[in-house]
Amino acid sequence: GPQVPDGVVIPFGTFRRLLDQPLEPGGPSVFRWLQQQYANLAKLSAKPAQQKQATAKLLARMRRWAETVEAGEAFRTQLHDALAKLVPGVGGVFVRSDTNVEDLAGFTGAGLNLTVSNAVGEKAVMSAIREVWASPFSDRSYAWRQSLMEQPEYVFPAVLLQSAFPSEKSG
């Protein structure tokens, strides 16, 4: 209704498809690499200090990847068209996160991942989308959900672009 700004959803499957890209040229897909890394972490369960260090390295690598991933020309074209309809002119959007695992049994992850406010322009919105894709790989997000997941490689963020109301100040 009129109380909720219009929005556009970038579904979980978009991020999942990006995971099929190689992490590095000639290397395994990001998804396969994640599976290998999480299997290695499981083997370190008797060595908590080493496991913690390996986890931090894995999460940092995934954040760097997500913050720089090339989503492709088709994605950029769809984003351009969606933004032109959602915020004609110079309007901004809130770039909000969701994941496929925010509502597990005994766990609600609402607000756990990133929201970027008032991203204006396609370049800023694309940067914010990448930040949101990276946010489930923060130490905090990982720690909160990890005790409830056996296969953490199946965490896929979705993104909601929601039009922002023009304002000089808010809050």
Image (tube, rainbow, N blue to C red):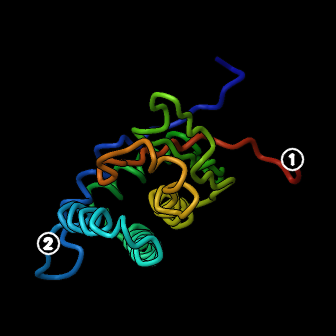
Mark whose residue sits in front, 2 or 1: 2
N-terminal-most mark, 2 or 1: 2
Mark 2 lies on a secondary structure that is: loop
When asked about the image quadrant of residue 63, the answer is bottom left
Where does residue 160 sit, x and y in percent of width and height? Answer: 51, 41
Where does residue 55 sit, x and y in percent of width and height? Answer: 42, 70
Image point 49% across, 57% down: which residue? Answer: 129
Image point 53% across, 63% down: which residue? Answer: 138
Q: Which residue is mark 1?
A: 170
* Most foreground residue, 143 or 120: 143
Specify the quadrant that holds the N terminus: top right
Residue extending furthest toward the front: 46
Amino acid on which the number 1 mark rests in the picture: Ser
**Is 102 situated left or right of 87 in this image?**
left
Where does residue 156 sit, x and y in percent of width and height? Answer: 36, 48
Q: CA distance from mark 2 to mark 1?
A: 45 Å
Give the number of the disc on residue 160.
none
Q: Is residue 107 above or below residue 27?
A: above
Where does residue 169 sit, x and y in percent of width and height? Answer: 88, 52
Amino acid on which the number 2 mark rests in the picture: Pro
* Most foreground residue, 87 or 62: 62
* Most foreground residue, 32 or 127: 32
Q: Which residue is mark 2?
A: 28
Specify the quadrant that holds the C terminus: top right
Dot 2 crowding, Cα within 10 Å, few <14, some 14–19, many 20+? some
Residue extending furthest toward the top: 1
**Is 134 situated left or right of 74 in this image?**
right
Q: Is residue 123 visible?
A: yes
Mark 1 lies on a secondary structure that is: loop
Image point 54% across, 40% down: which residue? Answer: 86
Dot 1 crowding, Cα within 10 Å, few <14, some 14–19, many 20+? few
